[in-house]
Amino acid sequence: MRKREPGSPTCGETEEPLDDVQGLSAYLGTATSWIYARTRYSSENKFPALRVGRHLRFRRSEVLRWLKDNSAAK
């Protein structure tokens, strides 16, 4: 079995860093409660969150795409 280089992406990963709830909240200028509320909805158009253990993590590019697709001013 071949060893993976430290820091190199594995199957399907990107090198984009993941934000935690507080980091995403600061970036978007929203309350953390707004983010938690969006992750609780289970619909076909779910807020893009990853679960790492019991923690939520977010890719900014996916969140920005979700916000663009779900903006009220379509």
Image: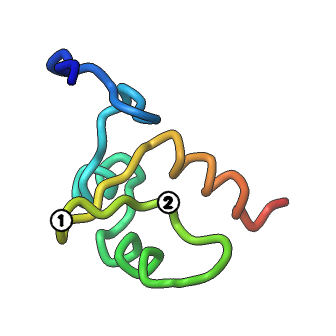
Q: Amino acid at mark 1?
A: Gly
Q: Nearer the viewer, residue 53 or 19?
A: 53
Side of 67 relative to 9 (left or right): right
Q: Position of residue 25 (x, y in %)?
A: 32, 58
Q: Is residue 3 above or below residue 27?
A: above
Q: Position of residue 11 (x, y in %)?
A: 41, 33
Q: Secondary structure at mark 2?
A: loop
The residue singled out by tag 1 in the image is 53
Mark nearest the camera among 1 and 2 is 1
Residue 27 in the image: above or below residue 15: below
- Name the image quarter holding residue 56: bottom left
- Residue drawn at point x = 44 percent, y = 43 percent: 60
Q: Nearer the viewer, residue 38 or 3?
A: 3
Q: Please give left or right for residue 11 compared with residue 70 in the image.
A: left
Pointer 1 with pointer 2, Cβ within 8 A: no
Q: Position of residue 55 (x, y in %)?
A: 20, 65
Q: How is the image coloured?
A: rainbow
- Is 47 left or right of 9, judged from the image as shown? right
The mark found on residue 48 in the picture is 2
User: What percent of the width, then of the height, locates residue 8?
Assistant: 27, 20
What's the residue at 28%, 47% (across, down)?
19
In what element is the residue under mark 1?
A: loop
How many angstroms separate mark 1 from mark 2 (CA)?
Answer: 16 Å
Q: Looking at the picture, which amino acid does disc 2 mark?
A: Pro
Q: Earlier in the sequence, mark 1 or mark 2?
A: 2
* Rendered-image quadrant of the N terminus: top left
Q: Residues within 10 Å of mark 1 (few under 14, many from 20)?
A: few
